[in-house]
Amino acid sequence: MNIVVCVKYVPDAQAERGFDDSDLTTNRESVEGLLSELDEYAIEEALKIAEGSEGEVTVVTIGPERAADAVKKALQMGADKGVHVSDPAIKGSDAWATSLILAHTINKIGSPDLVLTGMSSTDGSMAVVPAMLAERLGLPQITLVSELTVTEGSVQARRDGDVASETIVGTLPAVVSVTDQINEPRYPSFKGIMAAKKKPVETWSLADLGIDAGQVGAAGAYTEVIAVTKRPPRAQGEIVADDGDGGTKLAAFLAARKFI
């Protein structure tokens, strides 16, 4: 079984982000980044399925040169090969353009039996790319999956809601996004880290994918950033001196903020 996992290189949530003055988008070159944590669950699920079916896992990412680190981490976990789509014209792309690039990339790779993604990225948190990607590929989709069973020609998934769980059955090939409840991602072993250095990683441009630069980036975006505000400095906490009624003061503090 051939599986493609779409992953994203995101800014470190703890780092101070900068913005480009021209379009107010995140300057991804000026901030430390990493593989989106939620994508690790998709990688782990792909590896588990591949190990049970002697399959192959290909990881795909889009982004600047440093985004290759996301593919590197996936290869260290156990993925077989990677594809990094990098092109200056991609900067400023929204979810619509991202799904377009991913669809062209997957079509160029071949016809996978399964496409896996995380439930959303940890920077944008939109959770719409999996559905857009499925539409572009003309494949059935199952999103927000917390348990997945793949058999020959079909996939069965459990989706947990607020008040109930539902079981969904679909045909393969399909696009499936998974939640952080589906598994526990493995840590790269020393052996995996060393083996990753020999695994193939291809870098493709928009021209390689047959995509016109005007279809992506800020020029092709359906959304626009109007304003940004820096994260406010952390305010000093309030100290409650326990002079006999500390519990009462603490309760009043929490009640005023509707925590209790």
Image (spheres, grey):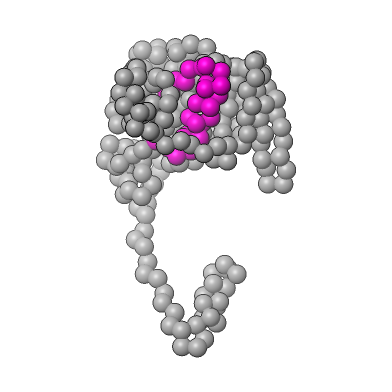
Tell me, yes or no, if residue 129 can be seen here.
no
Single out the residue that lies furthest toward the bottom.
244
What segment carries the magenta color? 35-64
Q: Please tell me which residue lies in front, 60 or 3.
A: 3
Q: Residue furthest left?
A: 30
* Residue at (32% x, 37% y) in the render: 28
Task: Quadrant for residue 157, please give it.
Answer: top right
The residue that appears at 72% across and 46% down in the rendered structure is: 163
Residue 59 painted magenta:
yes
Q: In the rendering, at what x and y percent does residue 236 appear?
A: 36, 69
Residue found at x 41% / y 30%: 77
The quadrant the N terminus occupies is top right
The image quadrant that residue 214 belongs to is: top left
Q: Residue at x 64, y 15 (%)?
A: 152
Rendered position, 15 above or below 139: below
Closer to the camera, 195 or 118?
A: 195
Query: Furthest-front residue in view?
Result: 191
Question: What is the count of numbered marks?
Answer: 0
The answer to if 152 sits in the magenta stretch is no
